[in-house]
Amino acid sequence: MNTSTATHDFQADIDAIGRSQIIPTLLETVLLATGMGFAAVARVTEARWVTCSALDQISFGLTPGDELEVETTLCHEVRQFDQEIVIDDVRHDPLYQNHHCPQRYGFRSYISIPIRQADGTFFGTICAIDPEPRQLRDDRVLGMFRLFAQMIAEALDADEAYAQSQSALSHERELASSQEQFIAILAHDLRNPVGALSAGLRMIERRDIDDKAAELVQLMRGSVNRMGLLIENLLDQARKRSGGGILIERVVAHDLDRSLAQIVSEFQAVAPEQVIQANIHIPDPVQCDVPRICQLFSNLLSNAVSHGRPGLPIEVSVSTQSDRFALSISNYGDPIPEDQLPSLFEPFKKGPNRPERNGLGLGLYIASEIAKGHGGTLSVSFDDERNTFSFVMEM
């Protein structure tokens, strides 16, 4: 018997059959049910016959990857004529008693059933041989082989569908990675023009300008600050997605209250119709990352300004007590729907009220990540017609 090893062209088919845990059991069942000594699943094309899986109890000598000359096999005829071949005893079979194949491979009993995938593609065969006669022309035996051929085809279809889904998933991941890199680069590059705008506004403020111009500068500064906040949130999101996380550098801060009060003043200037009642009392030094705490505070305050009910105040409370730092921001409004609470701190989630003012939906997510980075917690509650976001950490 002349055999050769299959090249990489058929390796995917061999691997697909090899991944199916059921096929060895099917081949073992074939041998037990028929008494035959060799059974295999073969990939059969017009030009090649390749072993994908085999169970050999008669030393026939084929293992996965081995190849026979396709013209020397009966599986070749199964493919050509799209029909089963069943031989109980070749010596008494009028069609095959003088056929070259039994003489070449030394078998007397033989069965080969085609394997067709769901789209009608001919994959190959499930076949078995034995040097002794076997009773194969039996409805139960034939039914078993046909069922096994169908099960193998379904396993191949499932493997192909899985491979396609994995390929699609890989493509989506690559696309998402490219998009995230683009967003990160864009956000980084936007820092410079936003910085230039801020510097220009500071220069204008130093000049002798009338009240109308001063009001306009304040409005522009508010817009620039919001752009800067969006940019920082985008950069933080990109760092988080790339595995870098949000960097927290804690120092002992003695003037955190002034930094937070400045943020309140900036928001009050750009939203004069929204009253902000701030009670900031931080008598003790706080070990924290001051820029990050200010970012968290700014994100929460921006959320309150966006969703607060017009005409009713936003209440800000910041304090230290013993070894605990507490910050809370409350705004009057409708309660956050319960179905949104589980995903409230996830990225790109937007609230139901006035969505046009929600930005990218990163503010609460970044605030949550900053809270985690400080070993603290960020939570939300609703009481007395107010939504309250609370941040607590140990100092």
Image (tube, helix red, strand yellow):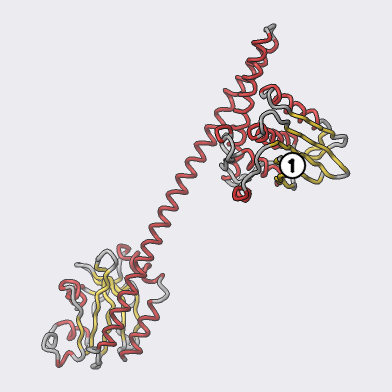
x then y, percent, for residue 230: 60, 32
Query: Residue 321 vs residue 303: left or right?
Result: right
Mark 1 nearby-residue class (10 Å; few <14, some 14–19, many ≥20): few
Amino acid at dot 1: Asp
SS state under label 1: loop
Q: Quadrant of the C terminus?
A: top right
Q: Is residue 140 above or below residue 23?
A: below
Residue 244, located in which quarter of the rendered image? top right
Q: Quadrant of the N terminus?
A: bottom left
Residue 98, located in which quarter of the rendered image? bottom left
x then y, percent, for residue 212: 65, 10
Whether residue 174 can be seen here: yes
Q: Is residue 250 above or below residue 34?
A: above
Look at 41% across and 70% down and name the residue there: 19
Look at 60% across and 39% down and name the residue there: 362
x then y, percent, for residue 376: 75, 47
Query: Residue 274 vs residue 160: left or right?
Result: right
**Residue linked to disc 1:** 384
Residue 196, located in which quarter of the rendered image? top right
x then y, percent, for residue 246: 65, 42
The one of 295 and 338 positioned closer to us in this rendering: 338
The one of 12 and 3 positioned closer to us in this rendering: 12
Q: Is residue 175 above or below residue 94?
A: above
Look at 24% across and 75% down and name the residue there: 114
Total tally of numbered discs in the picture: 1
Look at 76% across and 39% down and name the residue there: 328
Query: Residue 371 vs residue 8: left or right?
Result: right
